Amino acid sequence: MKFYLSFRSSEKTIAIITFGLVLALPFALAFNPYYLSIFISALILGSVSLAWNLLAGGCGQVSFGHAAFFGIGAYASALLVMKAGWNPFLAMVVAAMIGVIGALIIGIPAFRLRGPYFALSILGFAEVMKLLTLNLTSLTEGSKGIFNISSLPPIRLGGMALEFYYSRTTNYYFAAALMFAIYLVIYFFRHSNTGLAMSAVHGDEETAAGIGVPVFRTKVTALIVSAFCTALIGAFYTHYVHFLSPDSAFDGYWSVMPIVASLFGGIGTLIGPSIGALVITGLDEFLFKRFFETGHKLFFGLLLAIVIVWAPVGLLGKWMEKK
Amino acid sequence: MLEGVNYALFCLGLAFVFGIMRIINMAHGEFLVLGGYIAYWLLVMWGINPLLSLPLAAAFAAGASFLSYRVFIQRIRTTTELNTLILTYGIGIFLSNLFLQLWTADLRSIGVHWMESPLKIAGIYISLGEIITVTISFLGVLTLHSFLRRTKMGKAIRITAIDRDAAALAGINVEKIDLLAFSIGGLLAGLGGPLLGMLSFVSPVTGIHITVKAFILTVLAGVGSIPGLVAAGIILGVGEAVTVTFVSSSYRELFGFVLFVFILLVRPSGLFGKRI
């Protein structure tokens, strides 16, 4: 199974086509706010999936709790803006750094062991973070949630102001830009020395350690980058939806869906997860929810099982392998 | 403290499968909840005593895990660990959303009157239900332990766990052993479900909490140590009770996690396990 020989020119072409389609999509949807909001969440999911896949596809580490970083980013940014009165853009970046602190707290003990320890401890970590936000009511308002979180301030480009509060379109393109930025970060990270070390760790940890790759440090670095990106997106999310509660910020959705999206798109590829996110959000919205109103996520469980057994490189990965 | 013994039963299936097959069954909690729902359903539909539906619930969960092993897990058994993790996680998501669709998100509790009648033992009041569940849990742990130690099949399972290739060379059908072990894991989970329903409640999201707790206990006890599991269960049960009494009931779940991180840092092989 060739998980990590993915930097082929064909993939770059696919990435460019994908971002081209993302830019053109609003025109196809005639800027309908409802459809735009669906695809904004698809882009948010796509970014989280890219970050998730840096660990899984790059390093061979599965995280079942990326909701932890998403929620930390969302809450940190919301609190910095609402309680300390910071500029939302600055708050987003600082929130992402707070996400990194979370990554260190969980990564350092869990990566000391090989095997499933990391995957499960991060699941517990997400639960604990949710518990803390629920109970530290003086800081986070607990289960009531935080209302009326201010949106990002308008960006002035020449004479034109890009308004975030009213315009879905601005939010859409900002989310797309964020996804592109995260793609670039991950692209260059995977091509750096640490990225090569990650591939070695993924291939065979013992051999990697044998030739002098610092396995522990490589894993922690990958987690830090992944957590930074995820928390950044969480912070954007908070300013986009204006409302935050422990249930929405630490929702299992942010842990489960990146896995589904990445597997669907192909965890051996770089751009696959974001394509997967766009496709499955569409499928979910227009197909699955028609069948099962409440339990529509059961399709994702099934999809996950089927993809991992019969096409572990993902559907896109499979298609690229054939070429 | 009594609750700790129940914890041991809730976690037994996961610890067993992990110890034998080196697979973390992420759907473990969902199999357990499945057993709980079966017992609940039998009680509501036909008024069947949950203790009588215990074997049926266990059989259902065992059947579900048998099927998931045959259809999915067997095919990727020998690939990377990552794959089986994601696969069982997917099965868990499928099951929990199926529960959501079939039984809604309400908390279902299996309540029977006679279970709540208090008994006074050595000056402490304990409900009859608690005594019964603890007895069943204890018996479950004991049975599994002696099954592994005393029977030929148990011996075969243990050998497979120690060295797969050697076991295959000695004429043991390791594929069959895997299937059996995974089904036993499901059986044990299904046994725990009705007990959980009697003590508190089951809901579609209970499953994943159970899986996490089961993993924490497995690590705490040390992989492969069944008696250790009971001790670890009691430690966790007491610790949670102390947290509830002296800190706050909302921080109850925190105790297990802090303990878990501490164990990973200080003694990753667990309290009763061999050094990894």
Image: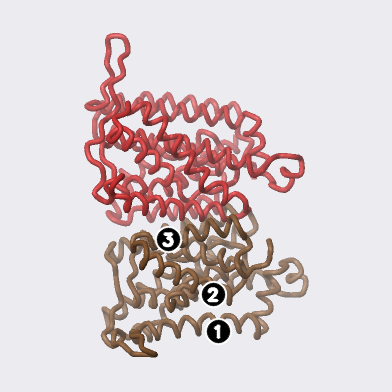
Q: Mark 1: few, some, or many residues within 10 Å (few <14, many ≥20)?
A: few
Q: Which residue is mark 2?
A: B231
Residue extending furthest toward the front: B246
Q: Amino acid type of disc 2?
A: Ala
Residue placed under numbered mark 1 in the picture: B143
Q: CA distance from mark 1 to mark 3?
A: 26 Å
**Mark 3 is on which residue type?**
Ile
Task: Read off the chain for label 2.
Answer: B
Name the quarter where the N terminus of chain B is drawn: bottom left
Q: In this figure, which residue is indicated by the disc labeled 3?
A: B208
Q: Is residue A198 above or below residue B245?
A: above
* Label 1 to label 2: alpha-carbon separation: 17 Å
Give the quadrant of residue B173.
bottom right
Chain with red colouring: A
Asked where in the image residue A230 lies, by quadrant, the reply is: top left
Q: Quadrant of the C terminus of chain B?
A: bottom right
The chain carrying label 3 is: B
Viewer-proximal residue among B118 and A158: B118
Chain under numbered label 1: B
Q: Residue at x 55, y 61 (%)?
A: B24
- B76 relative to B245, above or below: above
Q: Residues within 10 Å of mark 3 (few under 14, many from 20)?
A: many
Marks 2/3: CA–CA distance: 23 Å
Circle nearer the viewer, 2 or 3? 2
* Three-letter code, disc 1: Thr
Please give the letter of the chain rendered in brown: B
Q: Are marks 1 and 2 on the same chain?
A: yes
- Mark 3 lies on a secondary structure that is helix
Is residue A318 visible to us here?
no
Residue A227 in percent (x, y) is at 48, 39
For the question of whether residue A117 can be seen, the reply is yes
